[in-house]
Amino acid sequence: MPAERRSRSVTRADVARYAGVSTAVVSYVLNDGPKAVAPLTKERVLDAVRVLGYRPNAAARALSMGAADMFGLLVHDNRSPFFAELCHALDQATADAGRSLLIVNSDRTQTSTSEQIRDLLSRQIGGLIIADVLTAGEQSLVESLGIPAVVIGQFGETDGLHSVGVDFSVGAREATEHLIGHGYREIAFAGSAARYDARERGWREALTSAHLPLGPLVHTPFTYQGGYDAAVELLDGAVRPRAVLAASDQIAIGMLAAFGERGIRVPDDIAIVSFDGTVVADFVWPRLTTAVQPLEQMADAAVRLLLEPDAVRDHRAFRTRLRIRESCGCPASA
């Protein structure tokens, strides 16, 4: 290939010139229609594609077809076990729908969330999934995009947007009630300081309904380090709790590390129940009793909402399921 051709991207026009056909014929071959192309002509076009190394632009192809076949996913941090499993579930759900998924992390420091949303839109995505908490300005931007959008993993209805999540309050309440059922009375909570965290509300409701005092409350990031630091704070506090509800598996695993360093046995000295139900919860010791979020069902619901742009804006909430393991004090189970 001539040097001047290698110095720039090969275009559809280049393929057409090489094959001796029009760009429309190239389009018919690459898109398998709408018009039929003679076998010999089709072979010339495909040969030109191979020789020139032509790579169709996915966004341009989507525009030419009249509908983008790619969804964008804005996720806070796909390194976390929960978001990694959520991304996988969404990728499978979009593939089942004949779409592809473009994933962007919103925790980048060099670009704002609004800039990332605009960048996704510039790629001609056919829908947007948001696995993060939006500011009022960011939500207004999403509402103005003119494409289907859904927020996933939310605590409740998001005005103006489709949303999918679990009933965090009920899930946390059931998890706390399980600890109460073991006879534990001093039950702590470790989780987000955000005012909208329904897991803390569920913990409070369970203890209040059982006429028990609220145990120690530690606000900490949803990270392993956050869990480690929360455990240290609880152990150094005036009253050591007998059990703790951790708002995520990551927090709980960080707590296990700190408890182990201090010689605190789980569940003999302190029991733990966590939230999310990620795979890693089954590969620590003791294995975590955890409120499982049904990620596959949530992902399927989110994709269906994107494929139904005229659907009434609503919030679809799923129930969690408490997976019993050893960290709460229950005997070993399968």
Image (cartoon, helix red, strand yellow):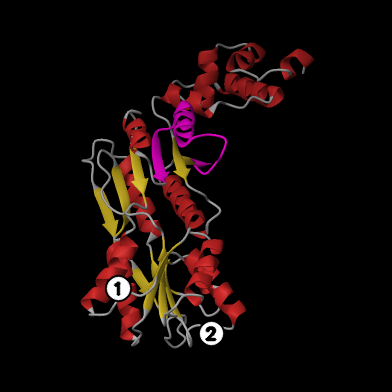
Residue drawn at (78%, 16%), measured in percent from left and top?
A: 3
Instruction: Decide: few, some or many residues near mark 1? Use Cα within 10 Å; few <14, some 14-19, many ≥20.
Output: some
Residue drawn at (22%, 80%), measured in percent from left and top?
A: 211
Which residues, given as a range, are shown in magenta?
Answer: 102-131
Q: Is residue 179 above or below residue 197?
A: below
Type of amino acid under label 1:
Glu
If you read the primary sequence from the N terminus, does the residue marked by circle 2 or circle 1 appear first?
1
| Residue under label 1 | 174
Q: Is residue 283 above or below residue 25?
A: below
Q: Judge by depth and name the residue closer to the eye, 166 or 208.
A: 208
Examine the image and state in which quarter residue 240 appears.
Answer: bottom left
Image location of residue 104, percent across then percent down: 51, 41
Examine the image and state in which quarter residue 125 appears.
Answer: top left
Residue drawn at (54%, 83%), measured in percent from left and top?
A: 264
Image location of residue 323, percent across then percent down: 40, 74
Residue drawn at (42%, 63%), measured in percent from left and top?
A: 191
Image location of residue 173, percent across then percent down: 29, 71
> Residue 265 got which mark?
2
Q: Quadrant of the N terminus?
A: top right
Q: Is residue 319 visible?
A: no
Q: Is residue 52 left or right of residue 164?
A: right
Image location of residue 107, percent across then percent down: 52, 44
Q: Is 253 one of the magenta-colored residues?
A: no
Q: Is residue 131 above or below residue 212?
A: above
Outermost residue on the front side: it is 238
Q: Judge by depth and name the residue closer to the eye, 111 or 22.
A: 111
Type of amino acid under label 2:
Arg
